[in-house]
Image: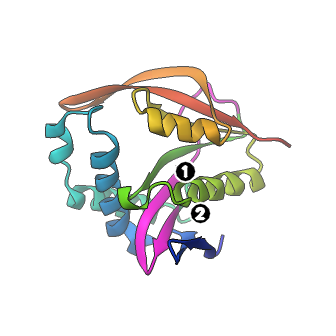
Amino acid sequence: MDARRIGDVDAQAFVIRRAGLADARAIAEVAVAGWQAAYRGILSDAFLDAMRVDAREVAWRERLARDVDGGAPAWVAERAGHVVGFVSSGPPRDEDVPLPASEIYAIYVLAESWRQGLGRSLLQTAVAHWRAGGARTLVLWVFEANAPARAFYEAMGWQPDGGRQALELGSASAIEIRYRLRLSA
């Protein structure tokens, strides 16, 4: 999908476009800031404070370089030339998700841009992409204790499907639950 301008928010429009290799650092910065803002009280402060952008940048550079066939796309939201959010997606990782299906791996928006339509637009972009590609089901994992994110997904039609897992992150752990969106034919 080409870049597209999405409405004026606080008199500044944002653009959603497909992420490229040059976006790895900006995505890493948004991811770290997103974790640190969204998961305080869910994960330990020590774990969140120890997160480093450089390590995430390497991982994002590798991930974006591997997506040469478009099978695991990511999109960024830009405002005034700066990345303020992203969504990444690809094939489902769970064997019990019936195909054709896809998974939203991550979606983060900088805290100062929350509640301005960026997250909604990012998620809608990914959903539209996978719907056009023939997916009938989308899934994502969210921390069970992350009530704001769960409310966001539910407002967009996603529902818990009973999937549940413990996510171990070194010194931190939390329970995740899986959400599902069924797409019409």
Say few, some or many: other residues with alpha carbon within 10 Å of mark 2 (under 14 / 14 to 19 / 20 or more). Answer: few
Q: Are marks 2 and 1 in contact (CB under 8 Å)?
A: no
Identify the residue at image location x=45%, y=32%: 147
Secondary structure found at label 1: strand
Q: Tell me which segment is drawn in magenta.
A: 75-98
Q: State how many labels appear.
A: 2
Q: Is residue 71 visible?
A: no
Identify the residue at image location x=31%, y=39%: 39
- Amino acid type at circle 1 is Ser
Magenta span contains residue 124: no
Query: Where does residue 57 sit, x and y in percent of width and height?
Result: 29, 62
Q: Residue 89, labelled with which disc?
A: 1
Q: Is residue 46 visible?
A: yes
Image quarter where the N terminus lies is bottom right
Quarter of the rendering containing residue 30: bottom left
Above or below residue 80? Residue 119 is above
Above or below residue 123? Residue 67 is below
In-front residue for pair 177/168: 177
- Upstream in sequence: badge 2 or badge 1: 2
Quarter of the rendering containing residue 23: bottom left
Residue placed farthest to the right in the image? Answer: 185
Residue at mark 2: 69
Query: Where does residue 9 sit, x and y in percent of width and height?
Result: 54, 70
Identify the residue at image location x=68%, y=38%: 157
